[in-house]
Amino acid sequence: MCGIVGFIGSSEAYPILIKGLHRLEYRGYDSAGVAMINPDNRVNVYKTRGKVADLEEYVADKDVSGTIGIAHTRWATHGEPNSTNAHPHVSGNGKIALVHNGTIENYAVLKQALVNHGVQFSSDTDTEVLVKLIEYIKETTNSSTVDAIRSALKTVIGAFAIAVIDRDNPDQLIAARKSSPLVIGLGETGSYLASDATPLVEYTDRVVYLRDDELAILSRHEPLQVINLDNEPANVDIQTLRMSVSELEKGGYPHFMLKEIFEQPRTLRDCIRGRVVNNNTEIKLSGIMDNAEAFKNVGRIVIVACGTSWHAALIGKRLIQDLGKIAVEVEYASEFRYSNPVLNTNDIVIAISQSGETADTLAAIKLARSKGAMVYGVVNAVGSSIARESDTGTYIHVGPEIGVASTKAFTGQVTVLAMMALAIGQLRGTLSKEDTAVIASSIQKLPDYIEETLKLDPLIKELSQTYTYVHNFLYLGRGYNYPTALEGALKLKEISYIHAEGYPAAEMKHGPIALIDRELPTVVIAPHDDLYEKVISNIQQVKARGGEVIAIVTRGDKTISGIADHIIEMPKVIEQLSPIVAAIPLQLLAYHIAIKKGCNVDMPRNLAKSVTVE
Ligand code: G6P
């Protein structure tokens, strides 16, 4: 939610800031802005509604000089997306500019107090309150910018990652965080900061992840200094960033989403590498092996996640229950944190998150830890907050996911959950060696299955033409593929704005069946598994009411091809892994329908990839 970038050094700041904003645009794209201190010591602030490209157009004839600056791309929380509410926000005297990611929960109280002291406001944002509070403290207490920021942040309730420049200190860029991510890069020609590491990659691999309640002073001539809000020095832990520029580019594809769909054979190879071992008879996951006693004696497992990660969690529940024989519950992280959950010290909480920054998931694991449960993170973004706050975990290692609609992260998450379920089964003796070997070898073959499935692209592209102008879709699946149906529906609605509902196929008769007519196509995930015959009955029920059916079936299926209107054949794969393969045609279908409708698939309206607000 919102992306921030900052730079101080010997190069011009503006090109670095704009490039950084483009990288962070997945975090929000309803307005954008930059502020630089120019060589005449003037703070130039430019902001506009719309995307980063709109900002570039807007500043084309303006003075963007300066070697220190901050920038922001916004996903509105307080105040509608317009240029007034866009960041940076500026102090009343025009000297201090600030960008913010997060939410100041007590902003109304703070604003009223400032108004009572005669401070004036021009925007509806919580952020303007913060910059004006800093200015007020600085002026009334005659303190330094750093001290004023520290004092202001101590009065703030909520989440923040901020970057501040002040004309009085043109050689200092100041940043601070609490619950919103911030990473600092130390380069040859200057220091960088950003909401994630993607804007830093081409300049440096030396990074420092700021911790909660830390404040960083990036100086032109001094080394990086980090202090806490009480002005005590904090440890500066410089880490090596492992990310390449090519991972962040489209690599010849028209959209990140398509690139990420087609990348899945490789990303799954990376995800599996070194984990399916011993001639495909064993799973090696250090997170499980290092905590063998905890998994042997576990009471129950609770999985918390949001969005697509929550769908992966539903599949994980079945996998762990089937293979590890442990009771598993799945909770939306946002509900879990306010449900006063009963957790015992022998419970394990698994948190699944692509970004590792989702505010609700982060809060859920903090709560779980406070109740003594062990937290296991299944995360993509290396070094992210959820990864760091977890006791242990497994990275999915699918590389940066830029398209807002999650694709390769979903298949990576389910693959890791399958490996975890196998590893837990091995450990607890709930799985025979033979069964382990069958599933482990199938995991090893997943990249090949996906490669084959991707060959369906032209067929799905063609099929998508039929459905471009449909207003509603129903997605049905059973067993392991009920969550796949939910995920297929989510993909379609996120990027094409077509209303789509995912349902357990057998539940259809308790409600959605009333909707079925010629105008409502139904996608049925119907691989040849234990529930196959029953799903055929569900398809018949749709057909009997005049509905159109697109069925995703196992290659060679003769029965459904005689009933459904359209058939998409996927390779034969064991039931437990079928959601990973079935997800591919659903991703492609959503993509092609959205493209035909002219939608911006990488940046769908109102969405953001990393939801760092409640
Ligand atoms: C947002 C994204 C989804 C994602 C969800 C959870 O809604 O648009 O694609 O599934 O957040 O994000 P996480 O990073 O925790 O997996």
Image (cartoon, grey):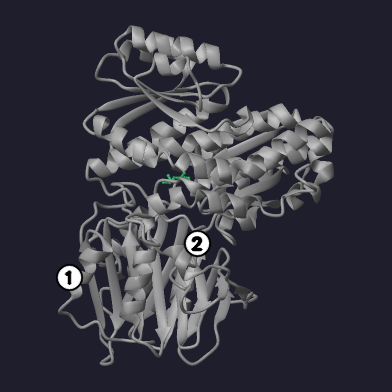
- Mark 1 = which residue? 58
Q: Residue at x 73, y 38 (%)?
A: 422
- Mark 1 surroundings within 10 Å by alpha-carbon count, few (fewer than 14), some (14 through 19), many (20 or more): some
Q: Position of residue 344 (x, y in %)?
A: 74, 35
**How many labels, in total?**
2
For the residues marked 1 and 2, what is the alpha-carbon distance in whole angstroms?
28 Å
Front residue of 191 and 365: 191
- For the N terminus, which image quadrant? bottom left
Q: Residue at x 17, y 80 (%)?
A: 62
Q: Quadrant of residue 320?
A: top right
Say what amino acid the circle numbered 1 marks. Answer: Tyr
| Residue at disc 2, secondary structure | loop
Say what amino acid the circle numbered 2 marks. Answer: Pro
Q: Position of residue 543 (x, y in %)?
A: 35, 11
- Mark 2 surroundings within 10 Å by alpha-carbon count, few (fewer than 14), some (14 through 19), many (20 or more): many
Q: Residue at x 78, y 46 (%)?
A: 279
Name the outermost residue toward the top.
Answer: 544
Front residue of 125 and 76: 76
Q: Residue at x 50, y 48 (%)?
A: 408
Name the outermost residue toward the left.
Answer: 61
Q: Is residue 272 visible?
A: yes
Pointer 1 or 2: first along the chain: 1
Tag nearer the camera, 1 or 2:
1
- Mark 2 = which residue? 181
Front residue of 553 and 287: 553
| Residue at disc 1, secondary structure | helix
Q: Is residue 151 visible?
A: no
Q: Is residue 161 above or below residue 191?
A: above
- 59 sits left or right of 502 in the view: left
Front residue of 485 and 444: 444
Mark 1 near mark 2, Cβ–Cβ under 8 Å? no
Q: Quadrant of residue 322?
A: top right
